Each structure stands twice: as C-alpha cells, then as structure tokens.
Amino acid sequence: MALNIKRPNGTEDVLPKDVHKWHTIEKIAGETAESFGFTEIRVPTFENTDLFLRSVGETTDVVQKEMYTVMAKETKFTLRPEGTAGTIRAMLQNGLLNEALPQRVYYITSCFRHERPQAGRLREFHQFGVEIAGSASPVADAEVISLAKSVLDRLEVKNIELYINSIGCPGCRAKYHDALRSYFQARKDELCDTCCDRLEKNPMRILDCKSPVCQEIGSNAPLILDYLCEECSDHFEKLKEYLSKLGIEYKINPKIVRGLDYYTKTVFEFVTTEIGAQGTVCGGGRYDGLIEQLGGQHTPALGFGMGIERLLLVMEKQNCRFLTPKKCDIYFATMGEAAVEKAMELTKQLREYGFFSEFDLMGRGIKAQMKYANKTGALFTVVLGDNELEEGRARLKDMESGEEKEILLDDKFVGSFDAAYFDKMMDSIENAETVSAFQNLAEEKK
C-alpha cells in the first residue's frame, strides 16, 4: 500500500540505526566547546521576521529567496535560517551582555532555508554554532577558529582546509564598494536581475551569487584586501600570526565574503573537496556591528556555524569512527506468565542501575525470542521458565562467545550480572587496538 503522506522535500529522517552518528558529533562538539569556556543556549525556532531583515541583510540570497516566513495575524514570523541572529537577540533581551565579558555560548540547532535540495544542502539542516560577545581582539578570532579545528580534529576528519579573509570595516568597505561598482558597471547587462539590484545596494553580494555567469564576471573583480584600512589590515596580520603560533595551517582566499551581511573583518571557512559542490563544513567570522544594529551597545562579537549533515557526509566517506550504538545488555526469554512477571521484576532492577534490559512483549515462543535477541545484538540472555523460577537460578549466556554461567535470581542478581558484564568489557578492552575502542566501551557502560 502506497504512503499517502511523505516527508517534505529537502528534509531527512534520522533513523535509530544512524542516530549514534549524530550523538558522536553532538557529544564531541559540546564537550569541546565547554572545554573552551562555552555554555549551551537554546532559542526559539522562529523569530520576528524583522530580526533577519536587519541582521542577515535584505540583499542576501537568504532573505530574498530562502526564508520560510508566515503571517500570524499582523505579525510576520520566520523560521530561523541561521543561528547567530536569534542567539544575539536572546543575549540582548536577557541581559547576558550586562554580565562579565566575554560571553561565550554554543548551540546545536535546526535551521531552515528554501533551497534546491542536493547532497549537503537541505531545506531543514542542523548546525553546531558558537558565539563570543565582548572581545575586539584578533586573539578571539584565533580562539574561535581553534575551537572549530579542535572539533574537526577530535572527530578525526581529514583533508579539510582552512581559508581566511578580511572583508574590512564599514569605513574601508565603502571604498571597496565604489571599486566594485565601477568594475561591475561595465558588464551590468550580463548580470542576473538580482545582482543588478545589488549593484547599487550592496555590490559585495554579487561575489556571493550562485549564477555561473555572475561568478565568471566576478572572478576578476577587485580584491577587498587591497582596500583594507590600517586597523583592519593590522587585525588580519595579527590573526595570521596567532594561527601560526597555534600550528593551524591556513590559506588566504580573498574571494570569501560569506553569505550574510553582518560580517566585518575576519571571515573564514573550513572546506573539503570530498562531498561535491557543497564542501564548506564550517563558516564564520566577526560581526562587530550586529549587536548595536539590534539595539544594544556597541559590542564586538564573532562566531561560526558548522553543518552537521555535511560533517556526517565527510565522516562516512572517510570511514571515521562513531560512538558504538547502544545494544541490549541482557535479554530475558520467558516461558509462561510467572516467568514474565519475574522478568519484569529483574529488568526494573537492572534499569535502575543503568543497564539496558529487555524481555518479550510479543508473546513469542522461546525460539523466536532467542532469534530476536541475537538479531538485535543483545550481549547476554537469560531463559526463564518454571524450572528456573522453582530453583531460583538460571543460566546467563554470553551471546558472543556462547559461554554460560549460573546466576542466582535473588536480590544479588544485579551485582552478579554487573560482575559478568565487567569481565566481558575488560576482555574486550584487553583486545582493543585503540584508545577510541576503550572510550566507546566506557560510553556503553554509562
């Protein structure tokens, strides 16, 4: 029978067999951010549309073509297309910027953009992002880039290059805009309609256009690095020095402008060539004017967003290691009502101590139950029937080795099973070839 309703185009279901991969990224990203002094923040999925018009920029593709906006009575709301604007709004509204600076927050969140779906580009996608508010120093830029690099390194992702650029401050960018207008004016008739409109309002956005014709025209456009003021130039030079001291390799790409208007000075991207055209797995930079633009005091700030779906594509292609999926520690195969009641009692005890324990809920025969336990990867099984209940003891079977040992069905059952479980884990650790294997087993035990 055909399904009447399917998931919307450009969205994905994360199935139980794959969710451990997401947990790997979320766990490592969160732990790494916290080691850098960041704490988690959670903000609404939708905001007043004006927030994104004022921050992201009316001439960007995001605002002009990609936002999901609805009218609720007389108010327009938009599903967040990126994480920074809502996070800064929350920091302002809740007084975080009145507390000790710098303020450092991170988030793992969903974002929404109406784009043509393809590998690495979805209409609902997920990001790990960080924001720092309060520091104007290029040391903070290096710190944020170092955090992104640390996450990628801990995930064991390879063949990703860091590209950096500076797009200057409003002062030096005004001169650059004049140079761009002069350059693009000569070929204005060849530009797409959107870029013709951008030519007067914000010519830098032409450099970010996805049209192949506009990209070809922009390939020989003037470079922003040639128009930086002394302050912006010094900031960029210092950043390069700090990255070198941290041992972080980088390449300068003067064509990076990022797709959002709030950026100033430093912009950067971590890019791979292994997943096709959508190779940017992390992008960010400085946005020193955004907080003031949204109604706060002038407060320099910066951050990045890291695409989780794109990271997964890279990790799967490179056969990176993920946390081991959780499997059932012990499965009770039951025969008869009394055995089911005993299994309920024992599983309750085991779960209170953090073990993953199951018993049959389908009324299957013993052979079918054992087949189920084997198929789902249960580590141990116990068969319970009238004889086991009468004698107060049963056989604990290691499903991998086939070894069995007698175990008492009394108040010491959990302790006896814990000892058997520990022995199995230690045997596995002794045979493990890497530290990561040990970490995975430790994670299972939790």
Image (cartoon, rainbow, N blue to C red):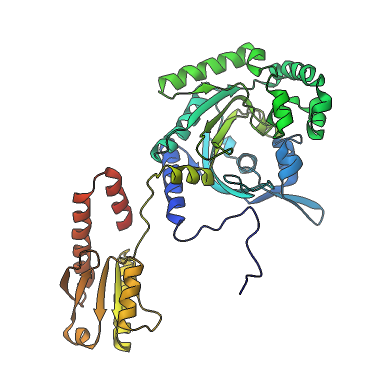
Q: Position of residue 339 (x, y in %)?
A: 29, 84
Of all residues, the one furthest to the top in this rendering is 230
Whether residue 104 is situated above or below residue 362 in the rendered picture: above
Instruction: Give the camera-side residue of 189 and 180.
Output: 189
Please name the residue shown 30% across and 80% down the image.
Answer: 367
User: For this view, does 363 lie left or right of residue 424?
Assistant: right
User: For this view, does 15 lie left or right of residue 362?
Assistant: right
Q: Quadrant of residue 97?
A: top right
Q: Position of residue 205 (x, y in %)?
A: 72, 29
Q: Position of residue 19 (x, y in %)?
A: 46, 56
Of all residues, the one furthest to the right in this rendering is 189
Q: Position of residue 404 (x, y in %)?
A: 17, 71
Q: Quadrant of residue 374?
A: bottom left
The answer to whether residue 25 is visible is: yes
Please name the residue shown 82% across and 20% down the image.
Answer: 185
Q: How many marks?
A: 0
Instruction: Give the camera-side residue of 108 and 291.
Output: 108
Whether residue 250 is situated above or below residue 373 in the rendered picture: above
The answer to whether residue 131 is visible is: no
Whether residue 339 is situated above or below residue 145 in the rendered picture: below
Q: Quadrant of residue 390?
A: bottom left
Please name the residue shown 68% across and 46% down the image.
Answer: 115
Q: Quadrant of the N terminus?
A: bottom right
User: For this view, does 259 lie left or right of residue 366?
Assistant: right
Q: Quadrant of the C terminus?
A: bottom left
Whether residue 33 is situated above or below residue 405 in the rendered picture: above
Instruction: Give the camera-side residue of 58 and 31.
Output: 58
